[in-house]
Amino acid sequence: MALPSFLDTLRLSLFDGGPGFSQVAVTNRCNADCAFCNFARSQGLEKHDAPADRLLRSIDVLYEKGIRYVALIGGEPLLYPDMDRVVSGMSRRGMEPIICTNGWLLSEKRIRRLADTGIRNLIISIDAPDAGVHDRNRGLPGLTEKIRKANAIINRLGMHSTASVTISRLLGDIKRLPTFLDEMGFADLTFSYPLQKLYSTYLSYSDSRLVEFSACELLAIFEQLKALKKHFRVLNPTAGMDEMMRFLRNEPARFPCLAGYKYFFIDWNLDVYRCHYLPTRICSVEDLPNAAPVRDNCARCMIDCYREPSILQYCAVALADSWRELKKGRLRSSAACLFNSNNLVSLEAVAEQFELVRRYKRRRETNGAR
């Protein structure tokens, strides 16, 4: 499979602010019944799947826009009937697709099929450091055991799975997470921050009490998450958590969100939005290459999958901005893009991610692949 190459990534990083990323909601169908999500099966939604032929034709469009990483989401994306065709097409084009799933459909046969399509990474939702609590919230008895067995196969095939843990009142004692996740076969996790309202077509939010927190409560939780980094591979950058804490304290953002410039959300109608949060449709997916980039220093939400990558990519964007200014002969402006203290914070955040990868590899070498 022709996954993103080093030279392609380097070219994009030097001259275009780095590779782009898009979330594509291929379906609104879901087999789970989570209490803090409006995709829950008990909502009785009218079913919508992204038109497969049109999505396949759009792969070149996404590539032309510089998008190299695509998270296939839902609902439950493994219910999408054309998943294998879409993933194979993206992999062949030199993109890296990632599937975000609740894990219920990850049988050995399905995992092997996904591996054949080019999938290397899966993100699996986890709601609590307790099997009973997690399975009850999902409305899928036995789900935790299914995920544990799936992870054994995933690791054996040389693939990788990351636990996606939503901050909710189901978590209880966060310090229990490392042991629980380790027993389930996860080597790392990413926290999703609680969402009670979104204004796009995306429905992964709820006004449930389970995700209702005061700013003071969330500030205390973020301190716990930062402390957890000493005990487990938490992928959320420390600088990203600091930025979210500034948001909660109503302090000015240090880093603008890159949604609408390097990141996008595409729904099952193949309509493009800058992110999950804002309601304005940009265009249809076919028109994305002609869409004007949005760079308005937005910082109106705390959605981790947009705000935190924006910190990691800030330095690459500054480098591309500097190059563009230099070509126009604006030496002072070019230098200002480079000599910005935010670039150092961005580089430190990137270095933190490389350190996490190094620790992960050392751990696997010491313990052996599961």
Image (cartoon, helix red, strand yellow):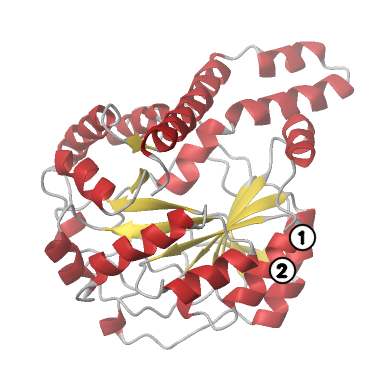
Residue 146 coordinates in the image, percent (x, y): 30, 69
Q: CA–CA distance between discs 2 and 1?
A: 6 Å
Binning the other alpha carbons within 10 Å of mark 2 as few (below 14), some (14 to 19) or many (20 upward) gives many
Residue 160 visible within the image: yes
Of residue 90 and residue 120, the one placed in the foreground of this image is 120
Q: Residue at x 88, y 23 (%)?
A: 327
Q: Quadrant of residue 265?
A: bottom right
Residue 33, above or below 191: below
Of residue 81 and residue 298, the one placed in the foreground of this image is 81
Residue 84, above or below 290: below
Q: Is residue 145 left or right of residue 335?
A: left
Residue 111 coordinates in the image, percent (x, y): 49, 69
Residue 131, above or below 67: below
Which image quadrant: the N terminus? bottom right
Q: Residue at x 25, y 32 (%)?
A: 228
Q: In terms of secondary structure, where does tag 2 sit?
A: helix
Q: Is residue 147 left or right of residue 212?
A: right
Q: In terms of secondary structure, where does tag 1 sit?
A: helix
Which three-letter amino acid code belongs to the residue tagged 1? Arg
Residue 277 visible within the image: no
Which three-letter amino acid code belongs to the residue tagged 2? Gly
Q: Is residue 90 left or right of residue 224?
A: right
Residue 230 coordinates in the image, percent (x, y): 28, 26
Mark 2, residue position: 89
Residue 87 coordinates in the image, percent (x, y): 63, 68
Binning the other alpha carbons within 10 Å of mark 1 as few (below 14), some (14 to 19) or many (20 upward) gives some
Q: Residue at x 36, y 44 (%)?
A: 187
Q: Which mark is residue 93?
A: 1
Of residue 131 and residue 235, the one placed in the foreground of this image is 131
Q: Quadrant of residue 262?
A: top right
Q: Which mark is residue 317?
A: none
Q: Are marks 2 and 1 in contact (CB under 8 Å)?
A: yes
